Amino acid sequence: MRRGLWLTGLGVSLLYGGMANADEVTFIVEGISRPLAANLAHALPPAVIGSQADRLEEAEMVAGLRLKDALEAYGYYGATWTESSKNIAKGKVLVTFSVTPGRPVLVRKIDLKSTGDGSKLPALQKLFSQFPLHKEGVLNQVIYEDWKGNVLSLLTARGYAQASYSRHEILVDRDQFWADIYLWLNTGPRFRVGDINITGAEHYPRWFIQRYISFKTGDWYSPKALAVTQSNLRNADRFSDISVHGDLGKAINNAIPVSVNLKSMPGQHLKIGAGYSTDIGPNAAIIYDNYNAFEQAQHVRVSILAAQLNRNASVTYSWPVGARLGSEYIAQGSYQNQNLTAYNANEILASAGRQWSLRSDNSLSKGETIEALVNFEDANYNVAGQFNTSLYIYPSLQYSIQNFRNILRPIAGYTLTARIEGASKVWGSDANFIRFSAQGEWRRRLGQDWVLGTHAKLGAMWLTGSIGELPPNLRFFAGGQNSLPGYAYQSQGPLAVNGEVEGGRLLAVGGFDIQRFVAKNWAVVAFYDVGNAFNSWSSFHALQDVGLGVRWYSPVGPIRFDVAHPLVAPQTPAVRVAFSVGFSL
């Protein structure tokens, strides 16, 4: 006889709507240890019932059945209990189960073994050495089932697609309170990826589609790699009706053929939208995309943004090259008008160059690139009451690395971007400078419901002459949602002689946050930030802010809503609201 906690997943089909006077029934368990009570609580979620008394009786009866299954899953087959109910508020009923757990079922025998090609796998042997149940220990079928699932996940991720348990039994003697465990694993043979057949999406070159595939013929077969490829193709915004499937039944010599079936989306998209950004205010945008220019998968994007504090028109042209996702030539040009707290600026920018991908696994959630560009910038600006114009031609080199389990749900992983650029009067620029900047973020899960995150931005510049010769986008400012959200966007930094912010040669901003998930895709967050832009460490004046926020991990990426309060040099308003959609640093 075998039971698992899955038995406690039998739902309570009670009325959740349609009744004006609905009562909520909450269940608690007492008389047992706190850890066991916490585990049982997962099997007894609150129920909403109608106002009729028979509905309360039904809720208590079903909850009792769920409690019985849960207690047996944790080894208490002889447990008894009494129940009582009382009204704790209008429309709220509390049902208390007073449990006497009785004598637990103990493990008498464990017959655990593995056969097959992968039985000597070091990672598998480590898991077997960490089998969570022991002789004379309480029978806990919950951790037993978890361990079984972890073993199969380990093997299938390493190519053992036919791994299974030839025998998996728990024999329980209820009268004698003992259990014998028989768990025999057969890893089966190890499989590789066979032929990869791409069908559909005929307008795209086959070599281009191959870039989104995160495996190649001869790799160890992994359902996870197939899922990454499916995600890559879905996020490419070029394909629909995506299917990535391995046919185990057609395996030849332990090689599983994989088919990738696609349907092309229209190559040209037009998007019109309006929204609000804390940094630039209310905005409207028009974006035109051609994802398959000349039917060579070259991408043309034309975007026009009209915002309260920023107007921007840009054209970007990129064409993929090579076998790796992220390797491409780039050409772009833009006009930008900004009217921010610290400055006004009009800028014409153009750049051209090449980006190389350093990873061969072709995953959008994990990437490593180097980008080399030649940049042209013509600007006129008013910063701290000083009007100026400038012309710069400068090369730049940028390194980026990103490693998240899921870029749409970036709660575990890290990202880093570092950039160096410089100009010289020798090739026509108005001043000599070398500028370095870096920004990064690291996140780690602390248990099931908690996430710890840290972030930082650093910058340093060597410049001959006055900083007034640089346009604002090449100076360092602090403030804004991804810097110091308690202060206005790009509003903080060293002061000019007239007391207004003019930007600095150095930047150091960092902070941390802690998230608590309250539902599957919803979390609340508390954060702290510190730092500023400055000209020398002796003049460094650290600003600080704290805040609270909400995260919704939506299908298009995280949606953030934060409220931040400055702790140093508070400015109006005392509380600032920050809002954004999607992953950003």
Image: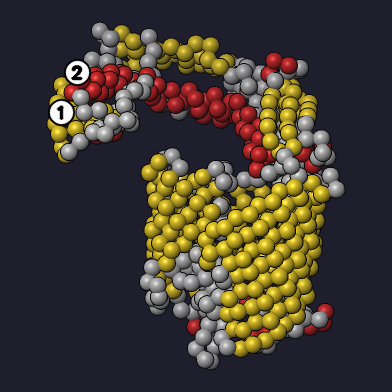
Query: In this image, 579 relative to 232: left or right?
Result: left
Q: Residue at x 63, y 69 (%)?
A: 311
Query: Against 513, is 70 above or below?
Result: above
Q: Nearer the viewer, residue 326 or 151?
A: 326
Is 160 left or right of 90, judged from the image as shown?
Answer: right
**Residue type marked 2:** Thr
Q: Is residue 109 above or below residue 551?
A: above
Q: Is residue 107 above or below residue 462?
A: above
Q: Residue furthest right?
A: 294
Q: Measured from the top left, where is residue 115 in percent x and y?
A: 58, 15
Please name the residue shown 54% across and 54% down the image: 581
Residue assigned mark 2: 80
Q: Identify the amino acid type marked 1.
A: Ser
Residue toward you, 70 or 308:
308
On-image quarter of the N terminus: top left
Kindly indicate the quadrant of the structure image that contains residue 70: top left
Query: Residue 396, percent across and down?
Result: 74, 67
Q: In the image, 385: left or right of 576?
A: right
- Using the image, determine if residue 360 lies above or below residue 17: below
Q: Which residue is mark 1?
A: 85
Question: Is any atom of residue 37 visible in this view?
Answer: no
Which residue is at the front of the view, 478 or 361? 478
